[in-house]
Image (spheres, rainbow, N blue to C red):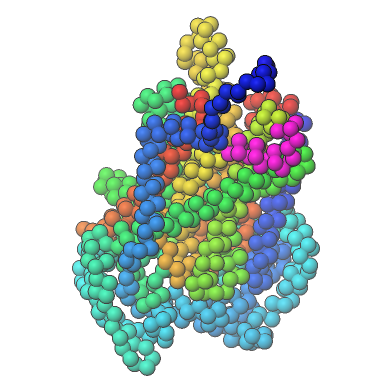
Amino acid sequence: MTIPPSGAAKPPRAVVYRRHPRLDQAKRTWYFFRRNTLALVGLGILAGIGIIAAYSATLPLPWTSIPVYCATDYGPGDTQTGYPGPYVPVASCPLTVCTYETTPPPNANEYCKGAWYKTPVVVYTNSSNTSYISYAGALGPTLTLSPFSVGPMPLGGLTTDLGAETPLYNVAGALARGSDWSLMLSLSIVGFGAMTGLFVGAIAGFYGGIIDDVLMRLVDVFLSIPVILFVIVMVTALGQLIPVHGTSGAYLKLLLLIAGFVIIWWPFYARLVRGQVLVVREQKYVEAARASGASKGRTLLRHIIPNSMYPIFIQFSLDVGTIPLLIGALVFLGFGPEMFPAVPFPEWGAITALSVEDLTVDMLGSCYNGPCIICWWQLLFPGLALFFFGISVNLLSDGIRDALDPRLRR
Amino acid sequence: MLTYVIRRLLLIIPVLIGVVTITFILFASLPISEQLLADIGPPGKGAPCGYNPSCTCSVLDPNSVNHVKDTCKCIDPPTVTTPQGICRNPAYYADIHKLGLDRPLPEQWATFVYHAFVFQWGYVSNYSSIASAEQTIAGKPVATVLTWFLPYTIELALLSLAFILVIAIPLGNAAAVNRNRPIDQIARVMSFSGFAIPAFLLGSLLVTGVVLLLLPHTGISVRTPWCPGGEALDHEFTYSWPSNSACYSNLVFPYSYPLWMKTGIQTSPTGFPTVDAVLHGQYWLALDSVIRMLLPALVIAYGTVAGLLRFVRNSMLEVMNLDYIRTARAKGLPEKVVTSKHAGRNSLNVTITVLGLTFAGFIGGFPVVEEVFHINGVGETIALAVVQPLDYGIIFGSTILFTFLIVAANIIVDVLYAYLDPRVRLG
């Protein structure tokens, strides 16, 4: 290095605005991601779902409460717990004495469920003999979107309002309403799981020794429990500690459900991250950080964790798509209306599961013995929504992997 | 190898204890009456009906048998009335003491763990919906009841595993070898759609579509020696066609008796329906039970293959880039040998590891699939035990059973892995 003579003027130094290297890397990743058409399609579908979800709360309610069967058919509620019984009207008809005027037309089998409910006039009578009338036109526009508009109401929801057994819902509206539930549940479950797993895995991999052994045995324990079974057991067992049978109780049970999923979900990430950390901690730059005096915590947080995150992104985007499927499986096993009374819960998997059950019953009841009309749309559209959600998440995940993995992108 | 296996076996002890502990935490959070009902305790206490408040009633108040166990009222004999005004079986407090539920939690935990390991998983309540629908299992020990149904699940699992391996490995390898060619795209579509179509939807579509709508129009009438009434094409039969319940009237709970009880085979040497049928020389019956398992096995395999395919493909892609593959090619080996022998075998490690990891999800999908297809397995038992009023004995017992199965499967996978990869067992 030559020392400039003391009198000479310094040459002006070019001002270079250096971006953060990770920003550069993200930009590069985005560049490679952008060239992948399928991944962009996936991102587009997801973005569309996100936009619908963001505005779904402003849409009109897609369901209406049309009483179909008399609540008293189902017997009294549970006096000990205060639970008013499965379909007993809570707000409007507290004394549960009701009759219905509408009878199914003789050829009801030739129509879809709900089709003949279009103009029922339902007379409720409570004990003081005051009758009041509720009719289907109350929420008119949502119902007249027929034929793509009717089906049984998914999950408890507003069923308790008027004592209806199967209030109707607008399939498109319910799907729009359910989009935020699906997204929120998926993202929160997988997000919490991934965060927990990230830290546990990083600590196990970084510190090694007995900490690693203990944490990994813990991971083994949770990895040996099937998720659906665990969630069922947890919601039924701990759910009994929640005596509230109102909206708040239902939300608490929903939280319990999320917690149950998270408890089973984090070990996958812990194992994934640990494997990655074991590789990363031997890298030169970690050594350099330590040599320059970085504390253990700083090394872990600034150098090791950010560099072990890539497999998490891929796994995360994959897992998000499976949550609605698992919730659908739960609902299919009967964790529907009983689990979340009084909360509208039009999650896509749940809608699909209930439609499957309903259609099967329809086909058994009417199709076998003659001509029948099947409400195929009540299954097709929720199924398609689930399908496109899963597909887009997969495409996105593939795109991320291809963009992050230098071996694959060229 | 032996030392590795022994070391691995020792490592599962803490895992098993941990799994049982988690089950215990959930069990201990149940109300005490539910715990009594599930009756995790030494056999003989409260048997044969477990703890059941109504058990000693000769006349039960019919209005009180809803679903909350505490509110059962005996008309004869009169029961103890608690301060809350709830009628209880006089044995209630005695049973709490007998089963040790008034002991400190650590002691209860130790008892629970011990009982879990000696297969004392309590009793089926004769108060739950599953038991009241099917009196055969009511009051029986849970472990005994589960052994009736486990063989069906094992047979189904083995068949699905066969499908999984037969589909995933060749298809994944072919996809990697023919990257971005049509077969790769087919594999990709299979993988994507498997992630996006829930098993209950696929299964129900198959049942209603194929079995209910198509089969009656084919003119196939299934007349078999064990369906002498020719109920083959009646409405309920076709619906439950892929089930083992066939032409029996009790279709809602088709597993009510194990197949060997229903079909006139009086002895069941193994408990496995197919094996038993073969042992008894009833080959039709064996074929029948395999056919019934085809569709459910395909549904299970489809979901699992989706998760497996991309790993098989990726690991194959990585192996194909390694030096020894280039060497093998350079020395003039046919491409077929290179891909199947050199690359295929070396990519198997990853496949087996991932298979072990997905085993929990694989076995966890059984309740849904068995429920859809009415297979008499543990899964369907779980699906029916979670119907209100629940049967906690079966729920907790089968949770323990499934976790034990998964731990066992993981050990098998690890040993296989060590066998395939010497670095593991020596390092």
Q: Quadrant of the N terminus of chain A?
A: top right
Residue B288 visible, this angle: no
Q: How many marks?
A: 0
Residue drawn at x 66%, y 66% is B29
Looking at the rendering, in which quadrant would you find the C terminus of chain A? top left
- Nearest the eye: A288 or A304: A288
Quadrant of the rendered structure where residue B100 is? bottom right
In the rendered image, is residue A26 in sight? yes
Residue A323, given in percent of the width and then of the height, sits at: 48, 51
Left or right, B100 with respect to B147, comes to: right
What residue lies at 67% left-to-right and 71% top-to-bottom?
Answer: B32
Front-most of residues B366 and B373: B366
Q: Position of residue A143 (x, y in %)?
A: 25, 67
Q: Residue at x 64, y 53 (%)?
A: B400
Residue located farthest toward the bottom when viewing the structure as drawn: A128
Q: Is residue A291 magenta?
A: yes
Q: Which residues are magenta?
A: A289-309
**Image quadrant assignment for residue A155:** bottom left
Q: Nearer the viewer, residue A303 or A336?
A: A303
Task: Choose between B280 and B70: the one closer to the eye.
Answer: B70
Most extreme residue toward the top is B331
Q: Main secondary structure of the magenta part?
A: helix
Return the x and y of residue B68 as percentages of the image width and height: 56, 75
Vertical side of A12 occupied by B204: above or below: below
Residue drawn at point x = 40 percent, y = 34 percent: A34
